[in-house]
Amino acid sequence: MTTTAHSYAQSHQERFLEQLKTLIRIPSISTLPQHAADVQRAAEWLAADMEQVGFTSAEIIKMPAGRHPLVLGSWLGAGPAAATVLIYCHYDVQPARLEDGWDSDPFEPVERAGKLYARGATDSKVNVITQLKAIESLLANGGSPVNIKLLLEGEEESGSENINAFVQAHGERLRADVGVLCDGGIVAPDQPSLVYGLRGIVTMELHLTGPERDLHSGHYGGSVHNPIQALAEIIAQLHDQHGRVTVPGFYDQVVSLEQSEREALAPIDPWYEADWQRVAAAPQPWGEPGYSLHERAGIRPTLEINGIYGGYTEAGFKTVLPGKAMAKISCRLVAKQDPDQIFELVNAEIARLTPATVKSDLIRLEAGAPAVAINRQAKALQVAKAAYERHWGRPAVGEFTGGSIPIAHALHPLVTDLIFMGYTYKGGQAHGPNEHIILKNFPRGIQTAIDFLLGLA
Amino acid sequence: MTTTAHSYAQSHQERFLEQLKTLIRIPSISTLPQHAADVQRAAEWLAADMEQVGFTSAEIIKMPAGRHPLVLGSWLGAGPAAATVLIYCHYDVQPARLEDGWDSDPFEPVERAGKLYARGATDSKVNVITQLKAIESLLANGGSPVNIKLLLEGEEESGSENINAFVQAHGERLRADVGVLCDGGIVAPDQPSLVYGLRGIVTMELHLTGPERDLHSGHYGGSVHNPIQALAEIIAQLHDQHGRVTVPGFYDQVVSLEQSEREALAPIDPWYEADWQRVAAAPQPWGEPGYSLHERAGIRPTLEINGIYGGYTEAGFKTVLPGKAMAKISCRLVAKQDPDQIFELVNAEIARLTPATVKSDLIRLEAGAPAVAINRQAKALQVAKAAYERHWGRPAVGEFTGGSIPIAHALHPLVTDLIFMGYTYKGGQAHGPNEHIILKNFPRGIQTAIDFLLGLA
């Protein structure tokens, strides 16, 4: 149904694009201290626009010295009986310099061949303005049927050090029925997609010690179990020849998808495979037989060696038989694997695999989170699907995202249903030169965001 | 038989010790540029003493700018029909500072409880003076029955960059019937030992590449064969569970010792094992069953991982699935393994073990040499044995040294028979604080060196 909000968005589209450009021109680079004032200026511009469009409140929340503020806007005009939606975006950007390979000034947005080029265009200012202007369109035309909290982060690109602490300390202010994580986007300009789950992670360091000190490999080689070799031997036993993790119990808690669910997920496969061939471009795919590449990286857990070090690694050669060796290991987790339990299982297996000739010590590192499972029966997801389909003319494909997104793990407990809705696309060269958006998708996104909010009523 | 040379050495012992102390007081540290003049001064002192004791010639051979001279002394008075012996020692030393843990000034020799403490005492000025004073004792008493070439190096402690080139360019000047490598020493103050062989070495770098770039381990983990894991899987297949190298053909050229030879070698075992427990001190010994620890590190070849690197190895964690990983590998070789052939065998096996999901490239590095086998039937070795036994009162034990000594490999082709004779002991803390020699072994060494030269007649 086309409402006055839809028409308003359409008739104000030029101004909306100008406002996106205005925000882009503020180089809110959170990773460079000399741009702290720009980040602050972007926050102030956003808070002022929130007030301008009729938010009940718009607050700039200061962070510790040298860090960057959150902007939290609320519109609670739908009343206490109505549902509340919490929308998250970030307004800070990565650094960019013309000489990095840009065809034009990264902070002066340029339209070329249906695209808008600028740092922050796709990551993630288009998402910020899309949400803000969808809300404006509703508030200027009788209001929204649901209460809205719009949370904008200013340091997503520089470690998100403070938002998790804020979320934990002020959870009540953020609590909502529906959470929308609005960062990133869809798989292709004309193919909407919806995230069905995020893998979790548990991280660790494996230390092996053998001889008490680094030895001369001539004098002792052959009589001492080299810790690098012992480490390799342990690592080699953590997967079978098919790439399946051999740690006993590792898959016990995995909630496997029904065959029908897997079939519903199949449309993503060609998109994932094309991306794999373009980005990963390994000699051959690898991994658990019986699963598509998307499934291997999305719905299956992993045990990955993220780093290894031992002995002499500089140029030339040193005849050392090192006293120790180290590997960084992580497990990507799927629902409902428990990070604590997975660590204990890996720990027990490594202890079992460690021969008497060396000693091993598996240390758990801080980084970790359980998987985030999106409730695919939730009304919010159905509404999002319908909104995308209406404006993109085709059904959204579902995808499981293999990486963890810290803010998703933090917000997950504060909302009844969490979904991911982004309005840019994966090919937009986020973080790289010539970052861009597809111009026609900007108004499409605003219409979709309006429909989503209306649909939650 | 006690000769006038023996008596001369005995009656001049105090002066010999004073001369050792004089040489020690020259801080001929070859690793520190500011001591270049001291190294030069030591060379001049040595050449002057050679002339003083009656050498036919004593030449200081300059090396490239910033490097340190050789001193080559010759006495050819035994005539063309007599045998010629080439003796190698080095006169440069490692750095030392009182604050490194010395109980007294490292360059002011101090006698305490039957030991003489000073930098360079054991490594290797006692060997230099022992040889020089044994020769003096002979030349002062009718001459030596064999011609003598005494080659003293000034940069053994700083890489021996130039001596190999000199040896190759001027081989004819050094050619001899017997070569004596006089560095290091015996296994214990009262237990002489003789080296029966040195292992050789071939060195290489194994590079594995998987995806074209470092990937996010969340987005691709499970669908890409991690190069660190693939490297570990390859390395783990290079030894069997007993520590035997599994590379086909690896042991084909190994000349195994006869049972009787192994029995004759057994007396070294307790000395090696005590050293192993003190220095290596790994949780447990490791290696090929059926061989003693000394045999595993001396008469058996190895395949060692000397370094490994891949992914993120700093503090904390990075969710990287790296594009590549690398290992440094060396094989210690025994007679008559050919370095070229061993490299080809390892190369072929690694190619065979490399799965289609990654690519491997094994690069041969420069460092390499075949094993040095000492002819245990040679007269030189029998003479050395008898000389040690006469002055130490017990038979020398035989040992195989697992490490390669570049100068031994360089001199080996220039002499008919090479032996190793040192007059200090392995516990003398070479390179460490409180380096020392056993005082009573200094005259014993000179008497032994005299007997050795007399015995070659």
Image: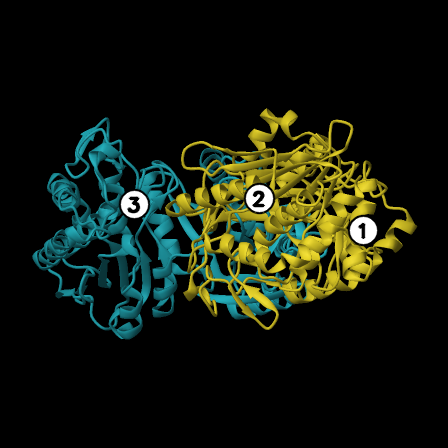
Chain colours: A yellow, B cyan
Tell me the amino acid under the disc marked 3.
Tyr
For this rendering, which residue is in front, B196 or B244? B244
Image position of A457 (left or right of A167): right
For this rendering, which residue is in front, B103 or A361? A361
Asked whether residue B136 is in view, the answer is yes
- Residue B160 location, quadrant: bottom left
Residue B340, relative to residue B88: is it above or below?
below
Mark 3 and mark 1 in contact? Answer it, CB < 8 Å: no
> Which residue lies under the disc numbered 1?
A385
Mark 1 and mark 2 in contact? Answer it, CB < 8 Å: no
For this rendering, which residue is in front, B17 or B366? B366
Whole-angstrom CA distance, mark 2 to mark 3, is 44 Å
> Which residue lies under the disc numbered 3?
B423
Whole-angstrom CA distance, mark 1 to mark 2, is 43 Å
Q: Disc 1 on helix, strand or loop?
A: helix
Q: Quadrant of the image for the C terminus of chain B?
A: bottom left
Residue A361, relative to residue B358: is it above or below?
above
Q: To which chain does the residue with label 2 belong?
A: A
